[in-house]
Image: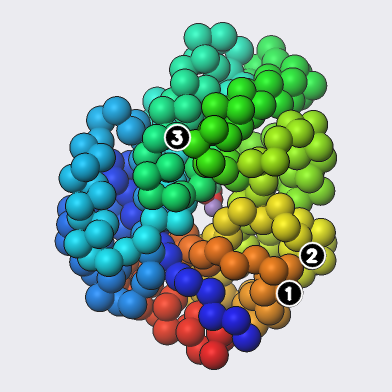
Amino acid sequence: MRRFPLSIVVSVQPARFEAATFKGDLDANLAQVAALGYDGAELAIRDPRQVDVDELERLVHKHGLAVPAIGTGQAWGEEGLSFTDPDAEVRRAAIERVKSHVPLAARFNAVIIIGLLRGIVKPGVTQEQAMTWLVEALQECAAAAAPAGVRLALEPINRYETTLINNVDEGLALIEQVGAANFGLLLDTFHMNIEEPSIEESIRRAGERIFHFHVADSNRWYPGAGHLDFRSILATLAETGYRGFVSGEFLPRPDVETAAREAIAYLRRVLD
Ligand code: LER
Ligand code: MN
């Protein structure tokens, strides 16, 4: 089977989100990620304005890592920003935050991830209104990213976290509505296991609109710790022509180092 380049989520700023696998000392974390054999680090960044980008680039290059994607969800998790908040100022701040990731993403040739920054349907807001705000926000962000050659990937997220885009079919319908060539999907096997009737069929349907790929097992532990059939899932992903990174986003259990080590050992076994 094709050997995908492998990356793992590393948080650049402090965060509560549990499945941001590595947190804390960035230099030490990147050193460990590289030593374990990963090709890249997916960086979770709450606010690019508070990051010394030159220093970040220096560290990433020092450890010989690529940055395939930048996660933006901490702006939701830590600050409550979202595309679908009833407060227009919060929606505007969420859009501006995503736009502020564009120069950083361009520098690393990274995809910008739209996960929970899309928000949830808050009391007093209809699903229809939230979807309209979501489409408009994505159109604006995609248009802002296009001149820099940057792509945006929306992640279908399971029903227990949001009602806005839970599965691939809803993601593909959203892509039609947004109508931008640089807008696609991030598929995450943890969410897919909850929402998709067949993970493989949904990967086939998403096809060339797959811009990034997260792996965690059924229990959100490292791949190999649950009951997902990664051999079949990754073979299907390869069949779509996807040539990007397979990125580990899982709980740091039993501890971060064991999880990261087990994940790469297992994925290599599956891919070889
Ligand atoms: C982020 O990539 C993710 O998978 C979501 O569960 C965030 O809540
Ligand atoms: Mn994910």
Disc with the residue nearer the chain's start (2 vs 3):
3
Q: Single out the mark in the foreground, 2 or 3.
A: 3
**Measured Cα–Cα span from mark 1 to mark 2:** 8 Å
Disc with the residue nearer the chain's start (1 vs 3):
3
Query: How far from the left and from the top, in percent, is residue 155?
Result: 62, 46
Question: In this view, which residue lies farthest toward the front?
Answer: 147
SS at circle 2:
helix
Q: Residue at x 44, y 50 (%)?
A: 109
Vertical comparison of 65 with 137: above or below: below
Q: Single out the mark in the foreground, 1 or 2.
A: 1
Query: How far from the left and from the top, in percent, is residue 89?
Result: 50, 9
SS at circle 3:
helix
Q: Which residue is mark 1?
A: 239
Q: Which residue is mark 2?
A: 204
Q: Which residue is mark 3?
A: 102
Question: In this view, which residue lies farthest toward the top?
Answer: 88
The residue carrying mark 3 has its beta carbon less than 8 Å from ligand 1: no
Q: Nearer the viewer, residue 56 or 250?
A: 56
Q: Nearer the viewer, residue 117 or 176?
A: 176
For the residue marked with disc 1, what is the amino acid? Glu
Q: Which label belongs to residue 115? A: none
For the residue marked with disc 2, what is the amino acid? Arg
Query: How far from the left and from the top, in percent, is residue 164?
Result: 70, 35
Vertical comparison of 140 with 170: above or below: above
Q: Residue at x 24, y 69 (%)?
A: 32
Q: Residue at x 53, y 74 (%)?
A: 4
Is residue 42 rendered to the left or right of residue 85?
left
| Mark 1 neighbour class, 10 Å CA radius: few under 14, some 14 to 19, many 20 or more | some
The answer to whether residue 252 of the structure is visible from this angle is no
Q: How is the image coloured?
A: rainbow
SS at circle 1:
helix
Tag 1–tag 2 contact (CB < 8 Å): yes
